[in-house]
Image (tube, rainbow, N blue to C red):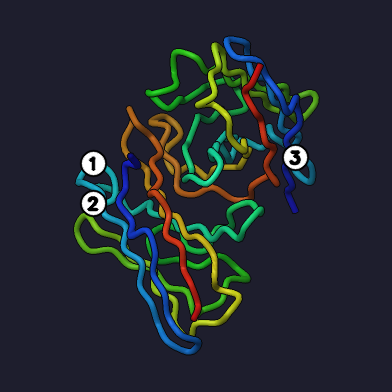
Amino acid sequence: QSALTQPASVSGSPGQSITISCTGTSSDVGGYNYVSWYQQHPGKAPKLMIYDVSKRPSGVSNRFSGSKSGNTASLTISGLQAEDEADYYCCSYAGSSTFAVFGGGTKLTVL
Amino acid sequence: QVQLQESGPGLVKPSQTLSLTCTVSGGSISSGDYYWSWIRQPPGKGLEWIGYIYYSGSTYYNPSLKSRVTISVDTSKNQFSLKLSSVTAADTAVYYCARATYYDFWSGAFEWFDPWGQGTLVTVSS
C-alpha cells in the first residue's frame, strides 16, 4: 500500500480537463510544499511534470498545473491530448525519517 | 545536460546481493547541489524510493529497506552504486537512478527527482 493515495484511473475526452488527486497526511503532503508529479509512458522512465506543488519545469506544457489544499495535492491537465495518456505519480517529502513517498499511480485514458 | 545510466546484472539469485551502478554524464556528481537517488518499480506496480546519497557520502534510506540497502559514491568515476542484500522475488523490479534537488541538506529534505535514468530490470530468480 502506497503512502499517498491516488485514484487508480481517470479518463477524459480530447479537449477536456481532468484532475488527479493525491491524498497524504500532515506529515507529508500537508506539511511541506515539496510535492512533485511525474508522467510515465509504458516502458519509459518517469518524467517530471510539476515540482514544488505548482511549478512547471522548462519544456512542460502549460496545460499541466498543480495545486494543494490541506493534505491533498492535485494535478490538472487541460485541453487533453492523446499524448497525455500515461500513468501519473505524485511524490512528496515526508520528513527526516521517511524522506520520500510516492502515490500508487493513476492511469489516464484519453477516450 | 545531465544524463544518468544504470548498469548491472539483470538476474540475481534469491538470498544474494543485487548490485547496480549509475553513471552520470554531462555534469559532476561532486557539484554539491544534489542528492543522487535510487528508485524502483515492480512490474505493473508503482514507484518506491530506495534512498539517496550526497557526494560526500552522507546517505538517507527508506526505513522499510534500510537494513538491506547500501548506497555508495565514487566521485573519481562520476558514479554511485546500490547494493541490496538478501533479495527475494519481491525485489524484482525496474531500478532507476535519478538526481534529487534538495532544499535542506542537513535534514535530507528534497524537492524533486529529475532527470531519471532509463531504468534497468532486475529479476530475482533461481
User: Picture coordinates of residue A2 (x, y %)?
Assistant: 35, 42
Question: Could you tell me which quadrant the N terminus of chain B lies in?
Answer: bottom right
User: Which is closer to the viewer, label 3 or label 1?
Assistant: 3
Q: Name the subunit of mark 1.
A: A
| Cα distance between the residues tagged 3 and 1 | 33 Å
Disc 3 and disc 1 on one polypeptide chain: no
Tag 1 residue: A27
Image vertical order of residue A107 relative to residue A63, above or below: above
Q: Residue at x 63, y 71 (%)?
A: A59
Task: Locate residue B73, reporting x and y percent.
Answer: 66, 22
Please give the chain letter of the residue carrying mark 2. Answer: A
Which residue is under mark 3? Answer: B5
Residue that badge 2 annotates: A30
Which secondary structure, mark 1?
loop
Q: Looking at the image, which residue sits at the far front?
A: B126
Please tell me if label 3 and label 2 are on a single chain. Answer: no
Q: Position of residue B37 (x, y in %)?
A: 57, 35
**Residue for point 76% across, 34% down:** B23
Which quarter of the picture shows residue B109? Answer: top left
Contact (Cβ within 8 Å) of mark 1 with mark 2: yes
Indicate left or right for B110 with B40 as reference.
left
Callout 2: SS:
loop
Nearest the viewer among B103 and B122 is B122
Quadrant of the image occupied by residue A71: bottom left
Disc 3 crowd, CA 10 A, few/some/many (<14, 14-19, 20+): some
Q: How far is mark 3 from mark 2, CA to CA?
A: 34 Å
The chain letter under disc 3 is B
Q: Amino acid at mark 3?
A: Gln
